[in-house]
Image (cartoon, rainbow, N blue to C red):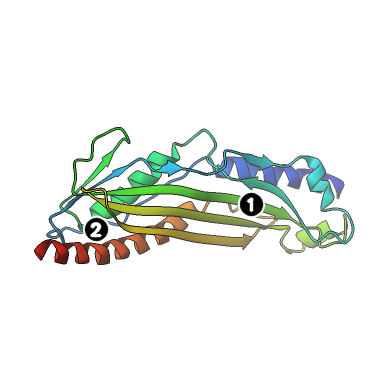
Amino acid sequence: MKNICILFFFFFVMGCTVSNNVWKYTAEPKIYKKQDINFTIQIPAFRDIRPNENNIYSGGKFLLAMVPFVPYTTITDLYVPEGNIANAPEIFAKATAAELANASIFDDVIVMPTSQKFVADYILEGTIISTNVKQTITFYGLSLPGDILWLLGAPPGKAYNNLSIQYRILNNKYDVIFNKTYFKEKDWWLSFYSNKGLNFYEELYKDINMQLLQDIKEVMKEEVLKNKQ
């Protein structure tokens, strides 16, 4: 049974590092219709204010869960789960831009590096606040006999994702006309028999972007009314 515990520890840690290196986002299909408004909007690379650290704890942390009456322990806590593989500020900006362009709200959606000039009617700024991934492991307070429960189908632990992004819209006078922070989270039980993966950012970011599109539509309705006055 000790060998099972050791193998499962590497299963947890390797599953975490591998499954979070790749992040893919698929925008909704393009809506072919006349744009809702004649304004243009540009989206620079997002700001990234996440802590620059990942915690994949040593075997000592794993062994802590084997202490009798300890309910669970955290074995991974990743603030930057994509590591050095992906460039999150550009990826998130392009994903939101694709949704905005495909929704046909604006006359044009411009994705730009941060250094470019403000050339559109509006600018959408994004700030990545959190993309946390966490894993816990439990022996149900039973020490080593607890892993027998895993073999019987009991969850060996739990995983958590959360995603938080702040959006601001500025007009060409640099007045902030929209400022909102979105937060989504997901948790699920892990299985000894299935490496489900730990990355559900697309699902969470899809929900955030769909809310953002609805909020932008409302904000831009007010802007259209202001410009008619």
Binning the other alpha carbons within 10 Å of mark 1 as few (below 14), some (14 to 19) or many (20 upward) gives many
| Residue 187 % position (x, y) | 59, 61
Q: Amino acid at mark 1?
A: Lys
The label on residue 134 is 1
Q: Nearer the viewer, residue 158 or 210?
A: 210
Q: Give neighbour class at mark 2: few <14, some 14-19, many 20+ (Cα, 10 Å).
A: some
Snapshot quadrant of residue 226: bottom left
Instruction: Check disc 2 and report the residue beneath it.
Output: 103
From the image, which quarter does the C terminus lie in?
bottom left
Please give left or right for residue 179 compared with residue 193 in the image. left
Looking at the picture, which amino acid does disc 2 mark? Ala
Gap between marks 1 and 2, in whole Å? Answer: 33 Å
Q: Secondary structure at mark 2?
A: loop
Whether residue 39 sits left or right of residue 89 in the image: it is left
Q: Taking the image as drawn, is residue 198 in sight?
A: no
Dot 1 or dot 2: first in sequence order is 2
Q: Which x, y percent locates residue 97?
A: 30, 48
Residue plotted at (27% across, 56% down): 29
Compared to residue 131, the image places residue 209 above or below, namely below
Question: Given contact means CB atoms under 8 Å apart, are the residues at marks 1 and 2 in contact?
Answer: no
**Could you say whether the residue bearing mark 1 is in a helix, strand or loop?**
strand
